[in-house]
Image: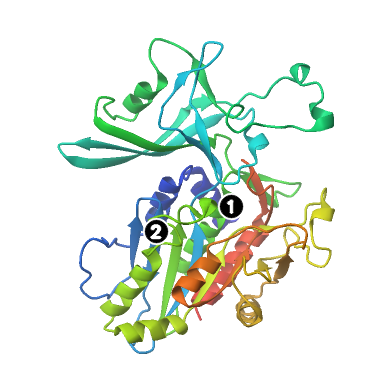
Amino acid sequence: MHAKIQDLIEFLRKSPSPYHAVASLKDSLGFPSKDESEPWDGIEESFLVERAGASLIAIKMPEKAPDPDQFRFHIVGAHTDSPCLKTKPCGPREGAGGVEQWPVEIYGGVLLNSWLDRDLGLAGRVTWSKKEETHHQLVKFDELRARVPQLAIHLDRNINKDGLKLNPQTHMVPVLGLQGEDTAWPSLLASANIDPESKDIQADLFFYDLQEPALVGMQEEFIASARLDNLAMCHAGAKALLESEAEENTIQVLCCFNHEEVGSVSTEGADSTFLPHVLERLALGLGASRDGFLAGLRRSFMISADMAHALHPNYVDRHDPDHQPLLGKGPVIKSNACLRYSGVGATHSRFLSWARKAGVEVQDFVGRNDLGCGSTIGPSLASRLGMDAMDVGSPSLSMHSIREMASTDDHLAMIEVMKAFYAS
């Protein structure tokens, strides 16, 4: 197995929630952290900043200090969140039939049927108060083994003819176990060494698939895993950042945002002040003026990296006949006339030049006119920063399923293109 694919598998395994993904990225990058609530006195070395524990921006400085009047940013943007089942704050409750269940909200565009009859763990972040201070702790309850059981065919005789129809309120509640004297929540807290009697306990918890990422296919040419959309692009960006050396005056930036799957409108989302503020403070720390910072944005470029749709062999009619990206044939440039994806011909041409330098073939995706396409962080960031940008992604199948599928070769190719971009 290629070392970078093994590393991707390990990253996916360690990142069952956006909070865990940011912690994993911090460990792999190894940059010192800066605190947004403290003054930044000059910028001399690479660093990273996290916001709300689930979004991260990493800055890699060139070997020679950038000229305050000539610097530019080369940015790769991705997101740390994935569609899933998020626990409701009510906690576990007694369900019908003597079982304990935990009500959930549907986070993002979940393919609900893919969550049925899966062994589910629970992960995220718990927050509580102690001595008037707020404490956070990452938790990963893989011993929970919850399930959302599907209705037997004997009680739904027409399912194969009429199709599966799921009510997100009533049909997607995970079963934790049999109802006992003690509820599951205090036991889970105690297993994480958190006092269940702590004040103001709150949690942001997400159910996740306990099945490990795996290589599949006759030649193990595919990777099957939860959260490929979009942790694969976070991983590719981080690898490229670490392995590339920039030209003079190029500042390399990796930003991985939470909440893309629900619109990015949050304190730490791509539509927030997070990236604009970090870039401006960085520019001011280099000695640039406000005018110099704005000029630097116009010299800069951003790649919004989010997984793309590969041609589905069983649903060819759902794809535009002239734009059918294939698994294993390289990164995909996304285009949309209504600018649901960022980028136009001029920006796409620049990406092609970086792909050519990397020796990588590139594909195009355009959706059918009678089907809507997805959205990304690209358009909102491009408009907020006034920066040239474009959208790309590795082709995949089963997007937004609990277990998605992509080509290992495409992941390696994406890393190489990102390296060429960062190094320019």
Q: Badge 2 local density, few (<14 within 10 Å), some, or many (20+)?
A: many
Q: Which residue is mark 1?
A: 229
* Residue 199 as seen in the image, left or right of residue 264: left
Q: Which residue is mark 2?
A: 56
**Which x, y percent locates residue 338?**
66, 69
**Which x, y percent locates residue 120?**
54, 31
Q: Amino acid at mark 1?
A: Asp
Q: Amino acid at mark 2?
A: Leu
Q: Secondary structure at mark 1?
A: helix
Gap in angstroms between the C-alphas marked 1 and 2: 17 Å
Whether residue 66 is visible here, answered yes or no, is: no
| Residue sitting at x 48%, y 68% | 381
Q: Single out the residue that lies furthest toward the bottom.
A: 69
- 182 is higher (above) or lower (below) than 133: above
Of label 1 and label 2, which has the lower sequence position? Answer: 2
Q: Quadrant of residue 83?
A: top right
Q: Secondary structure at mark 2?
A: strand
- 74 is higher (above) or lower (below) than 409: below
